[in-house]
Amino acid sequence: MIQDEIKSVEEEIHKTKKNKATERHLAMLYCKLGKLRDEAEKKTRGGGKGKGYTVKKSGDATATLVGFPSVGKSTLINALTNADSEVAAYDFTTLTAIPGIMKYKQASFQIVDLPGIISDASVGRGKGKEVLSVVRNADLVIIILDAKKLHHYNIITKELHDAGIRLDSKPPEIMFKNSMKGGIKVSVTVKLTHLSIEMVKEMLRNYGFINGEVIIRKNVIPEEFIDALLGSRHYVPSLTIINKIDNLSSEELGRVRRKFPNAVLISAEKEWGLDELREQIFRKTKLIRIYLKPHGKPADMNEPLIMHEGITVRDLGVKIHKDFVKNFRYAQVWGKSARFPGQKLGINHELKDEDIVTIVI
């Protein structure tokens, strides 16, 4: 079983001390681990036997609810959206992926209720393959825990990691340039404390990279380097919520807060904490609202364009019309990104949430 092989290699890596004599052996182990995880991930993406879950994305962002059976996902999605997900106090109530739409701050969020994840989901136990294949396409992963079963957090995050899903991180700053000859050249712009140049070269050779240059701009660990080599990982933000806090004493609630200081604490059944949850979903997906103001007319404050943080006037214009860039003269902006109301700004100006924009062409 792949999971057993992965565990065996992980244990050997943990037992092997890093020094000059073990560098090559460690490089081989990390490559073997990467290939095993890649194999497990491909099986996840390929799905299992029978009917899989194909969820057509809709709305401005998609968030998936990931948790163990009977943690309260169905109750929560019914409270947040217009979905109709069966609710019962026993495991595996939800047997298909059920999407619903949550409206908040004039944006639409597709929230997907998935069957409960279980240990070894990444290698197909239960409905693990189908569940994780949907998670890979999400803009946000919401991990939902039972307030009395917090140990499930480590199991869930490990299953996601083994399926090639990287939570709250960005792709490693590593560039690969192939060439026809000359061997392997490794260029680094930072001090490497987890990898030696020889380990890097050994891992590259193990993956068939014989000639070319590798540029490393971040002090990466071996697993991150393998991730960059494989190039098939999915990087996504996450949000942890802890449900059923109505079953806790004040002392237990305090312990939960200390253990998960950044989690949103809720009771889906009693609808406690849902306003904070909606706000955190909005923030984590990094959406912003841009209101358009026709020249000489009032702004349309009812239907903003929903876009992502970091967008510029150019990005906004391209979304409005394909010929925007060549005809652009200037933009007038009212809001957080302008120094004063109606400031005239250029095409590369970065917009902020709730900016009002007039584009002059």
Image: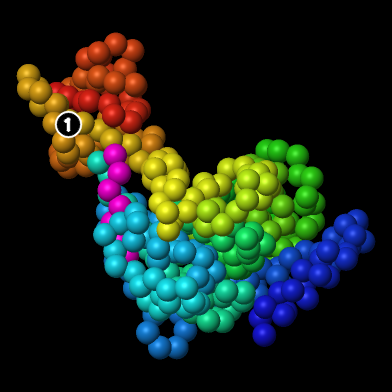
Three-letter amino acid code of the residue under disc 1: Met
Above or below — where is 228 with respect to 312?
Answer: below
Identify residue for label 1. 301
Q: Quadrant of the rendered structure where residue 148 is?
A: bottom right
In the rendering, at what x and y percent does residue 279 appear? 40, 41
Farthest-out residue, bottom: 50
Image point (57%, 74%), residue name: 118
- Nearer to us in this view, 34 or 139: 139
Q: Is residue 187 visible from the viewing direction of this image?
A: no
In the rendering, at what x and y percent does residue 227 appear? 61, 60
Q: Quadrant of the rendered structure where residue 341 is?
A: top left
Image point (29%, 39%), residue name: 105
Farthest-out residue, left: 296
Q: Is residue 274 left or right of residue 28?
A: left
Please count the marks in the image. Answer: 1
In the rendering, at what x and y percent does residue 253 appear? 62, 48
Image point (68%, 46%), residue name: 251
| Label 1 SS | loop
Q: Is residue 274 visible from the viewing direction of this image?
A: yes
Quadrant where the N terminus sits is: bottom right
Farthest-out residue, front: 249
The segment highlighted magenta reads 99-105
